Amino acid sequence: MIEHLRHVVLVVGWWWPQAAARRRARSCRRSFPACARVAARAVSRAFSGLKDIEEQSAFNRFIVGEKQDVRVDKPYGVALYQGKMYVCDTNASVVVFDLERKSFGLLKGAVGHGKLTQPVNIRIEADGTKYVADPVRGQVVAFDRNDEYLKAYGAPGAWRPVDAVPLADRVYVADVANGLIKVFDKDSGALLKAFGDKGDPSERLDRPTNLAFDTEGNLYVTDVGRFQVVKYDRDGHFKTTIGSGDNMATSRGRRVLPSTVRGACTPSTPPSITCRSSARRDACWILRSGRR
């Protein structure tokens, strides 16, 4: 009899959290903001430095002493690749949290020609190539799958690259200083074109900050100066805008959901956008000013 009761307790112990998860999922479908709050509570682990990821044994501590904690100072852009989390520390370099090996350190290729000054955003392709936008250095710096320096796009000077996203054989870069999207050849690094400053005033960019492509190759540009998302095709032809320009909530129902994506919308950390695809549709999430 006691053995049977033990199995009942185990079944109940398994079923209860599963049932709670199903109830949360139903709540998420009814109310997206509520879903976001539930998710924020569920993901409770934070990574901010060496001691959050590395484990030092008592023997090692006795031999070499306790390791000094090294922490991320001002994180913004983040990307994941093969068990590693790459974080742009805008006051230092790109920090790498190896979640599998439980190690923490700086991007090894970010020295010499690959040295970073103020990395703000990072994108990683399926083959492991990384693109880091550095507005103070004035270039987008590329690193290979092993985190070694590859090349840099653009010449330092009168532009400020704040985000870069690859598509096919091109790299699209947001230039916040000139209100442009600059397009580079991925292999040669040559500047192919720039767009965002032509056409009707309603079609022009002001301060583009973050980029995302959907599955059809349409480019979405968050513009902190316009308080809108501007949509172009991959060749730079204007298609539409999302948002009224003063209240992003009016764009709901147009496949755009206000949500925390990356960072906070302040003059030093512009609004972010990311697109995800499903079998039924593409959806883009936008962080808008004053909302977390």
Image (tube, rainbow, N blue to C red):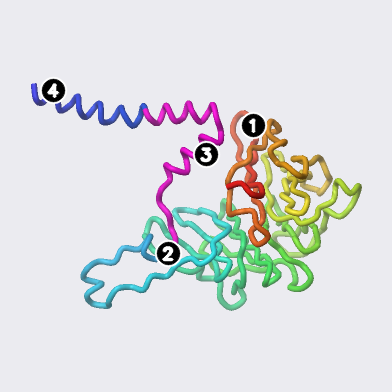
> Is the residue 218 above or below the residue 253 in the image?
below
Q: Are dots 3 and 1 in contact, CB under 8 Å?
A: no
Task: Name the disc covering residue 281, or none.
Answer: 1
Which of label 2 and label 1 is nearer to you?
A: 2
Q: CA distance from mark 2 to mark 1?
A: 37 Å
Chain-order first, disc 3 or disc 1:
3
Residue at horizontal 42 percent and vertical 70 percent from the top: 70
Which of label 2 and label 4 is nearer to you?
A: 2
- In the image, the segment drawn in magenta is 20-49
As for residue 36 lying within the magenta part, the answer is: yes
Which of label 4 and label 3 is nearer to you?
A: 3
Q: Position of residue 173 (x, y in %)?
A: 72, 58
> Can you identify the residue that label 4 sits on?
4
Which three-letter amino acid code belongs to the residue tagged 1? Arg
Horizontally, is 272 left or right of 14 in the view? right
Residue at horizontal 31 percent and vertical 28 percent from the top: 16
Q: For this rendering, which residue is in front, 172 or 135?
A: 135
As for residue 226 lying within the magenta part, the answer is: no
> Is the residue 37 above or below the residue 123 in the image?
above
Chain-order first, disc 2 or disc 1:
2
Query: Mark 4: which secondary structure?
Result: helix
Q: CA distance from mark 3 to mark 2?
A: 25 Å
Q: Residues within 10 Å of mark 3 (few under 14, many from 20)?
A: some
> Can you identify the residue that label 2 sits on?
49
